Image (cartoon, rainbow, N blue to C red):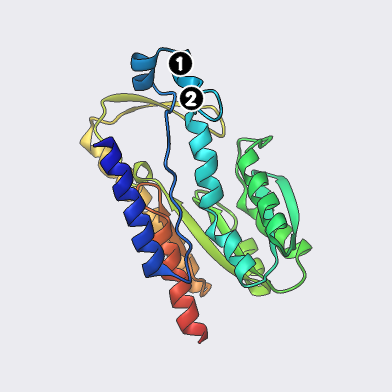
């Protein structure tokens, strides 16, 4: 089953590459031994000396190795700029500007941008969209296409969004997690706010609590989408429980037809 699954994945990759070419480059990651709980039961915590000696890295891989490779391959926005010979830059932010890389051309520069994203060493756990939007409007003078990647769970950024979009073509990529839409029945749960560290205890078995949460989040999403439509902004929704490739391909195809 293991070998058959890998062969199936390789065949699927080739089929998608043929179907989506030349707009999309398709890659896949064929993993070897990964240090997981299941592997530890079979090979031991050290991975088994006899086994690790046969591996190129002389050790079992860890999940972060695969995550890093995945992020490098899952950078279609940046790599599409290489094909079109466009400049690409980066503004990485929390409630302040963490990193700013001026837009430039070239594969080497794009890899620098992706490497900076992978670092993930933010100095703050808070979020302020207004800070990033104001920075974009002030520092980037030439008209540009800017993708704003966020869950948009924030307030008081509408004016900054309007100003930034007036100067640039701003495209929101909205990240949505299923847990942000509705709460499952898990009994008494202690939630920690990742920004403030505050602990909130919620009885998720209470149907009224779950229904109120769902209504609140639905209203918030509706207001956000209404804001984008009012400002005549294209937006792309990326769900964490689904592939991010399909909505991006759909957006770029629509954009190509519109600009044809």
Residue 205 at x, y percent in the picture: 23, 30
Badge 2 vs badge 1, beta-carbon distance below 8 Å? yes
Q: Nearer the viewer, residue 104 or 94?
A: 104
Q: Nearer the viewer, residue 34 or 243?
A: 34
Q: Residue at x 50, y 27 (%)?
A: 55
Mark 1 Cα within 10 Å, few/some/many (few <14, many 20+)? Answer: few
Query: Which residue corresponds to mark 1?
Result: 50
- Quadrant that contains the N terminus: top left
Mark 2 Cα within 10 Å, few/some/many (few <14, many 20+)? Answer: few
Q: Decide if residue 190 is on the left or right side of residue 59.
A: left
Query: Which residue corresponds to mark 2?
Result: 54
Residue 40 at x, y percent in the picture: 39, 16
Vertical side of 196 occupied by 134: above or below? below
Residue 209 at x, y percent in the picture: 28, 37
Circle count: 2
Residue 118 at x, y percent in the picture: 61, 42
Q: Decide if residue 145 is on the left or right side of residue 176.
A: right
Q: Residue at x 68, y 73 (%)?
A: 167
Label 1 residue SS:
helix
Vertical side of 47 occupied by 183: above or below? below
Q: Nearer the viewer, residue 246 or 133?
A: 246
Q: CA distance from mark 2 to mark 1?
A: 7 Å
Mark drawn on residue 149: none
Q: Residue at x 44, y 20 (%)?
A: 51
Give the image quarter of residue 79: bottom right
């Amino acid at each position: 089953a293991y070998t058959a699954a890998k062969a199936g994945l390789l065949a699927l990759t080739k089929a998608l590459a043929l179907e989506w070419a030349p707009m999309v480059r398709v890659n896949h990651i064929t993993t070897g031994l990964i240090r997981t709980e299941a592997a530890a039961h079979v090979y031991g915590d050290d991975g088994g000396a006899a086994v690790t000696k046969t591996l190129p890295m002389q050790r079992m891989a860890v999940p972060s190795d695969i995550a890093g490779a995945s992020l490098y391959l899952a950078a279609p926005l940046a790599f599409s700029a290489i094909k079109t010979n466009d400049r690409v830059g980066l503004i990485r932010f929390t409630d302040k500007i963490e990193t700013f890389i001026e837009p430039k051309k070239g594969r080497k520069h794009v890899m620098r941008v992706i490497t900076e994203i992978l670092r993930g060493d933010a100095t703050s756990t808070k979020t302020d969209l207004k800070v990033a939007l104001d920075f974009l409007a002030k520092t980037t003078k030439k008209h540009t296409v800017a993708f704003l990647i966020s869950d948009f769970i924030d307030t008081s950024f509408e004016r900054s969004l309007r100003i930034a979009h007036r100067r640039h073509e701003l495209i929101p990529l909205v990240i949505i997690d299923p847990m942000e839409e509705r709460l499952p029945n898990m009994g008494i749960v202690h939630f920690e706010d990742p920004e403030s560290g505050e602990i909130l205890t919620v009885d998720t078995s209470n149907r009224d609590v779950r229904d109120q949460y769902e209504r609140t989040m639905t209203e918030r999403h509706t207001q956000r989408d209404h804001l984008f439509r009012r400002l005549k902004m294209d937006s792309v929704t990326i769900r964490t429980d689904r592939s991010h490739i399909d909505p991006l391909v759909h957006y770029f195809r629509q954009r190509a037809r519109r600009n044809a």
